[in-house]
Each structure stands twice: as structure tokens, then as C-alpha cells.
Image (tube, rainbow, N blue to C red):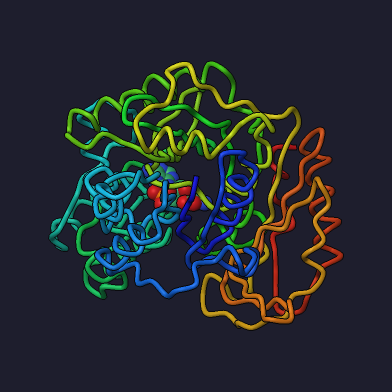
């Protein structure tokens, strides 16, 4: 099978790493990729992902058998629709990608199909929104409707912070048109976890649950980021919870999207809040999470042929009894980021000693580039994920942090407390 993988993050490096293990693979090309992908496996021409006609021409010309789309933006723009008549695509159609592309759509969808979530109201008028938040008890949750790179949500501890959040979005326009519509939501208490499922339009096959760390600094302090580290298994997720998520979230989402005329094919990411043994949906995303994927895929059993499953999702033929097998033990990833991230940060930081992967430690590249002499430099805010497997979380964690000590470089930082809560 000849595969095109789209994206440039740690998530895509992890997908590349797992897809490469498939006996079905004959050739893989990644666009735009990063310094972790060998040069020979990168697409050699420059594509414009905003020009879907040109992308479709390229895919046709190169006779790909499957396109795997990593990030949400091209999906929300309709890349799956543009390629539909050319080759199977792992990733939802534009209609289905609204589950992430519009929080208002997503909330209405959950309400319509009885998927447990927080109560919410949507506003496009600033003074109406202001009047509404003044009637609420803090904390107050305000979300921008459109894509905001994981930074569109504010959980305001008091009314003045909520007002600021509202003004930022609706008056100052810090998220552009994405923020003109806001969702004001009931605050949910509990513990967060993410459950991803492979979907073929009818069936949703879950991965083990994982837990992300969204804040930039230790102790869940600082601004929200794309994610600074993740681990699994998550101690509070048991079989009963998985069953509730399957029946009340995943199965209802699959049936609902079919009824809406947007059968869901690809990866469905359910961000969940768990309290009293029950989960409610915080958000849906329409792609693998990053960095969670960098911890999840290495813990899949060797017998799992991810490429085979991605293809079956894309063509709507997952066997109803398919299950994802995992190794025993635990997996943990810590993200190394450039100082300043998620604000402005330095680029071109030289990175050393990150190519020597032992079998149970993996370096997943994110914002990196490799020069012709093999040197590696940072290009992004999140630079690298260091993943280790272990007999348990403690062991995996120890290996990751020992490795991070060895590769320490000025100009970068990472959280010291990934996975600590679970211990
Ligand atoms: P989202 O982008 O929707 O995942 O939101 C980002 C983060 O804000 C989540 O991971 C939660 O920590 C927090 N959050 C979002 N919605 C709520 C809510 N209704 N109640 C409590 N926390 C929330
Ligand atoms: N790590 C959170 C996300 O991928 O949305």
C-alpha cells in the first residue's frame, strides 16, 4: 500500500513510526513532515494544503492507496471530500469535521443525540452574552466557536475574568471570526481523560484512555498549550467507564452522524470529564490527539496492524468485533518545548543526542528540521516528545526523565510532573 501522511507534529511522527511497521506498507510519503522523518520519506514537492485541487492532482498523479490526515485544519477545510473520488482517506468529511470545527455544532449535536455533556448557551451578541454571564455563579467557561489551536477556552474563576474573556473574543477579536460566536458552558468538576476511537462510519473501536497535561507548567499552572505530556493507563478509567463511553458517547455519536448525513470515518477524540464513575464530553476532536498519540501507539501490541485498521476505517469496513490489543504495562511521553511556548519562542535551537532510540525509549520529533549533515534544529514551540514504556507508570516515568536529563539543552523546557498525579 502506498500511503500519504499529512502533518508535521509529534503525532504524525508517531503515526509514521507505527505505520512503518505494517507488512502492508510498500511506500510512505509525509507532507510536510519534520526532522524525525527520513528525507527519502518526505514529499519532495511543495504542496499548498489550502489548495485542495492541487493536492487532489498530486494524489492522483502519485497513485496513493490511502491518505492519512493528521491535523484538524485540512479536515475542516474539506480535504477528505476533495480526495474522495481519488483514493480512500483516513479522516472525516468536512461535514463530519464540524464536530471539532464548530463547538456550537458539536454542542447542538450532543444535545440532539443525548450524549452527556455540560449545559451551554451560544451567543453572537456581546451584550446578551454579558448579561448571561452576570447571572451565573463562577467558575464560568467561555469557548470560541471555531478552531483556535487549543487556546480558545477560558475557565474564568470570577466574573471579571469572564468579562475579560468575553471582551477578548467578541470585542477585541483575538481569535478573529472564530471568536465572534461564543459558547458559555456549565463548569464541570472531575478528572479529565481522553478516549480515541477508530471509526468506519458505523463502528467505533476505542483505544485505551490516556491523560494529557494541557497547562504549560508544573502543577497545572500557566497558560493552556497543545499538550505538554501524556500517559496511560489512567487509573480511574475502568471497564464500567469504558462501557458507558462506548454506549453513551461513541455509539451515539456514530449513529447521530449517520442520521445527520455525515457518517464519521476517521479518528474520533472524546475529551471527557469523569466524576462519580461517569463521563461527560468536554469536547470532540476529529483527529488523533497530540501528545497523547505519542504515548498510545507505542503501547499497542505488535500484532496490531494500524495501517490495516486505518485503511478499513477509510473504506467503511472495520470488522464489528475488531478490538485494539495493548501491551501490559504503561507508556508516558513528556514534551520538550522552546522557552516562551505557548507565547513567542526562539527557533533554531540546536538539538543533540536525540537520535539514539533504545527499544523502549522513542524520540518523536515535532518542531524540528534536519540539515543535510544530519544536525537537528528546532523550528516550533513543541519540539520533541520523549516516550518510554515500562512495567508500570513509575518505571516508564523514570526512564523518560533520566533520558531528558541526558539531552538537556539551553533554550528548552519540559514539565517535571507528567504522570505524577496518577502515582
Ligand atoms: P477544550 O478545548 O474544550 O478541551 O477545553 C480546554 C480545557 O478547558 C479542557 O481540557 C478543560 O480542562 C477545560 N474545560 C473546558 N470545558 C470545561 C467545562 N465545561 N468544565 C470544566 N472545564 C472545562
Ligand atoms: N492534546 C490535546 C489535543 O490534541 O487536542
The foreground one among 372 and 129 is 372
Residue 182 on image: x %, y %:
24, 56
Q: Quadrant of residue 168?
A: bottom left
Q: Which quarter of the image is occupied by the C terminus?
A: top right
The foreground one among 174 and 137 is 174
Q: In this view, does 70 lie above or below 420?
A: below
Q: Can residue 347 be seen in this view?
A: yes
Residue at 68%, 42% in the rendered image: 298
Residue at 42%, 26% in the rendered image: 318
Q: Can residue 139 be seen in this view?
A: no
Residue at 48%, 46% in the rendered image: 288
Residue 300 on image: x %, y %:
65, 34
Residue 208 on image: x %, y %:
58, 31
In this figure, what is the number of numbered marks?
0
Q: Quadrant of residue 186?
A: top left
Residue at 74%, 27% in the rendered image: 328
> Is 18 left or right of 288, judged from the image as shown?
right
Q: Is residue 380 above or below residue 358?
A: below
Residue 315 on image: x %, y %:
35, 34
Q: Is residue 44 above or below residue 190?
A: below
> Is 84 left or right of 344, judged from the image as shown?
left
The foreground one among 224 and 8 is 8
Amino acid at each position: 500500500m502506498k500511503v500519504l501522511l499529512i502533518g508535521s507534529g509529534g503525532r504524525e511522527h508517531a503515526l509514521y513510526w507505527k505505520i512503518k511497521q505494517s507488512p502492508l506498507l510498500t511506500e510512505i510519503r509525509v507532507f510536510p513532515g519534520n526532522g524525525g522523518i527520513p528525507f527519502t520519506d518526505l514529499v519532495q514537492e511543495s504542496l499548498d494544503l489550502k489548495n485542495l485541487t492541487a493536492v487532489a492532482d498530486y494524489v492522483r498523479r502519485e497513485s496513493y492507496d490511502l491518505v492519512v490526515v493528521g491535523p484538524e485544519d485540512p479536515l475542516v477545510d474539506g480535504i477528505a471530500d476533495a480526495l474522495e473520488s481519488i483514493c480512500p482517506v483516513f479522516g472525516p468529511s468536512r461535514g463530519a469535521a464540524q464536530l471539532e470545527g464548530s463547538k456550537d455544532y458539536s454542542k447542538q449535536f450532543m444535545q440532539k443525540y443525548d450524549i452527556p455533556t455540560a449545559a451551554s448557551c451560544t451567543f453572537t451578541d456581546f451584550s446578551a452574552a454579558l448579561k448571561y454571564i452576570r447571572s451565573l455563579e463562577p467558575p464560568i467557561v467561555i469557548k470560541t466557536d471555531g478552531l483556535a489551536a487549543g487556546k480558545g477556552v477560558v475557565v474564568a474563576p470570577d466574573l471579571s475574568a469572564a468579562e475579560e474573556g468575553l471582551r477578548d473574543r467578541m470585542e477585541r477579536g483575538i481569535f478573529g471570526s472564530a471568536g465572534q460566536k461564543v459558547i458559555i458552558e456549565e463548569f464541570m468538576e472531575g478528572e479529565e481523560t481522553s478516549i480515541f476511537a477508530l471509526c468506519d462510519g458505523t463502528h467505533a473501536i476505542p483505544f485505551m484512555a490516556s491523560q494529557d497535561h494541557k497547562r504549560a507548567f508544573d502543577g497545572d499552572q500557566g497558560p493552556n498549550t497543545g499538550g505538554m505530556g501524556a500517559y496511560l493507563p489512567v487509573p480511574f478509567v475502568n471497564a464500567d467507564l469504558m462501557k458507558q463511553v462506548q454506549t453513551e458517547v461513541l455509539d451515539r455519536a456514530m449513529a447521530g452522524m449517520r442520521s445527520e448525513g455525515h457518517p464519521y470515518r476517521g479518528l474520533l477524540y472524546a475529551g471527557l470529564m469523569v466524576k462519580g464513575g461517569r463521563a461527560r464530553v468536554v469536547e470532540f476532536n476529529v483527529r488523533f490527539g497530540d501528545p497523547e498519540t505519542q504515548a498510545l501507539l507505542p503501547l499497542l501490541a505488535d500484532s496490531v496492524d494500524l495501517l490495516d485498521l486505518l485503511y478499513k476505517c477509510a473504506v467503511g469496513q472495520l470488522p464489528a468485533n475488531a478490538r485494539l490489543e495493548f501491551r501490559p504495562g504503561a507508556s508516558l511521553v513528556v514534551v520538550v518545548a522552546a522557552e516562551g511556548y505557548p507565547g513567542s519562542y526562539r527557533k533554531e535551537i540546536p538539538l543533540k543526542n536525540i537520535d539514539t532510540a533504545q527499544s523502549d525509549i522513542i524520540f518523536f520529533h515535532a518542531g524540528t528540521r534536519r540539515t543535510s549533515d544530519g544536525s537537528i534544529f528546532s523550528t516550533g514551540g513543541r519540539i520533541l516528545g520523549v516516550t518510554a514504556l515500562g512495567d508500570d507508570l513509575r518505571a516508564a516515568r523514570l526512564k523518560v526523565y533520566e533520558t531528558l536529563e541526558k539531552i538537556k539543552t539551553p533554550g528548552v523546557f519540559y514539565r517535571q510532573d507528567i504522570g505524577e498525579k496518577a502515582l
